[in-house]
Amino acid sequence: MPVQMPTAEQLRDVADEMGLTLSEDDVQSFLGLIAGSIEAYNVVDGLPDNLPTVRYPRIPGYRPEGEENKYNAWYYKTRIEGAADGPLKGKTVALKDNVMLAGVPMMNGAATLEGYVPDVDATIVERLLDAGATIEGKAHCENFCLSGGSHTNATGAVHNPHRMGYSAGGSSSGSAALVAAGEVDMAVGGDQGGSIRMPAAYCGIYGMKPTHGLVPYTGIMPIEIYVDHTGPMTGNVRDNALMLEAIAGSDGVDPRQFDVETHPYSEMLEGGVGGMKIGVLQEGFGHPNSEADVDAANRAAADILAKMGAEVREVSVPMHAIGTAIWTPIGVEGLTGTMMWGDGYGHSRQDLYVTSLMDFHHRWRDRADQMSETTKLFTMLGTYIRNHYGMRYYGKGVNLSRRLAAEYDRVLAECDLLLLPTVPLKATPLPGPEASREEYVQRALEMIGNTAPFDITHHPAMSLPCGMGDGLPIGMMLVGRRYAEPTIYRAAYAFEQAEDWKSL
């Protein structure tokens, strides 16, 4: 796709956008000066892209329908066999549909991306296959991953396997539903505001948001580098640890990764919680939309851990109450600049830039009316802030996130883990076809208060089921120090082995 020289009119349009005043002589002068740079662009255009090779054979697969896709959780089904041996041999995996799987369609929940077929495998895809896993296909996710509900995918809502017509959570909605329904053993999720942990809580599975950068994001469509996380969603703790073990570690490309510290997680589950110090985070309870049974189940779970030998006490981090407010400019302006106007990537970092995705996604500008209401909302807000206030609030949000992280670290210096409800409420009814925009957006954002803060502080956090209320799962979140995933797993495993959460 060679770059053409701009016309005089096109250059004047650019100057107007920049606030420049150019005479006709200025226009001709700049056109002459630009010519050499256009030649350089076309040298780059003529060179082959430097992309990793695809090593495992596969077929594109198909869109399952009817009873084969009861919960609308699958986007595409295929079957890619991994290595002949490995720690994940015999395990089946679904990929969230923002993860690139070469030769298999990807739409990231959005009509504007439907028809795109990646030409590379994400790093975690290679690692799963190298570990012997079998990839069964792509799981639906929310429209550009911008919803904590499961109603924004362009093909329709994803249903909760515990109750049809109810939310499976988001944005890793299909991943959670497929694991909860027993259709796969494991699934990949992504988490920028809680999108692994929220659907895990709604569907009653185990979802780990690892320490930021522990798992490479290379080959996954970003939202915003500062909050991008990917991690395992499984039906039990051991599978979760096995999966994280397979995908964690630096890949030498992802700029989110520095000083990465990995562990043999599956070998560190035993030991119980005896002597472990767990802080029940006061500000995680009693939100305006908190349901009494959710708060009660989490406090009861804390009591169970105490009976098992943990030292449990209430702790306070007052700043947690404004964590989502601090997250907002980072998430909104970051996604606007990176994922939307930046064609999925933006600038100024080392990364694997998948230019085929950038080219395809660039076309959203011609089809913006087809985006979800949440994508429209965030993109308009981020663009407004950028145009009228610049980037200061993004920068201030990042600065404040370090202060918030220090407040959690202050408590975690005296506690091994924090405990709080993953989300303040259980799965909600899906918005109906006549739902207002206000209801649609409310159902997408009402549950992020406890999860989003840990995306900007980068602490590892895991949702595990701790009870049922009115036939729907209730999630408990355990939060640890950076790279303290083994501590989280040890407590989660002890709780899982001690209690059948469905009977609590």
Image (spheres, rainbow, N blue to C red):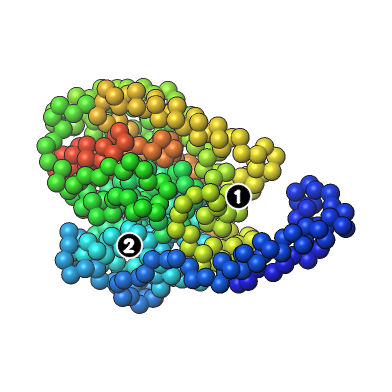
Residue drawn at point x = 34 percent, y = 27 percent: 409
Label 1 and label 2: CA atoms lie apart by 30 Å
Going by the numbered disc 1, the residue's amino acid type is Thr
Q: Is residue 368 visible?
A: yes
Position of 340 relative to 61 (above/below):
above
What is the x, y in percent for residue 281?
Answer: 34, 27
- Work out whether residue 400 or residue 374 is closer to the camera in this orientation and state it: 400
Q: Secondary structure at mark 1?
A: helix
Residue identified by numbered label 2: 125
Indicate left or right for 5 with 73 as reference.
right
**In this picture, is 58 found above or below 342?**
below
Q: Which is more N-terminal, label 2 or label 1?
A: 2
Q: Position of residue 474 (x, y in %)?
A: 31, 42
Image quarter (top left, top right, bottom left or bottom right) of the C terminus: top left
Point out the residue furthest to the bottom here. 59
Which residue reaches farthest left? 271
Quarter of the figure with residue 243: bottom left
Assign the N terminus to one quadrant of the image. bottom right
The amino acid type found where label 2 is placed reads Val
In the picture, measured across the screen, residue 145 lies left or right of residue 76, that is right
In the rendered picture of this protein, how many numbered marks are placed on residues?
2
Q: Quadrant of residue 60?
A: bottom left
Q: Which residue is rendered at x = 32% and y = 24% of the image?
A: 411
- Identified at 17% across, 62% down, the residue is 86
The answer to which image quadrant residue 188 occupies is: bottom left
Q: Name the residue located 77 percent from the left edge and 61 percent from the top edge.
A: 31
Mark 1 lies on residue: 379
Query: Foreground mark, 1 or 2?
Result: 2
User: Residue 317, how many percent across, how many down?
Assistant: 39, 24
Q: Nearer the viewer, residue 322 or 269?
A: 269
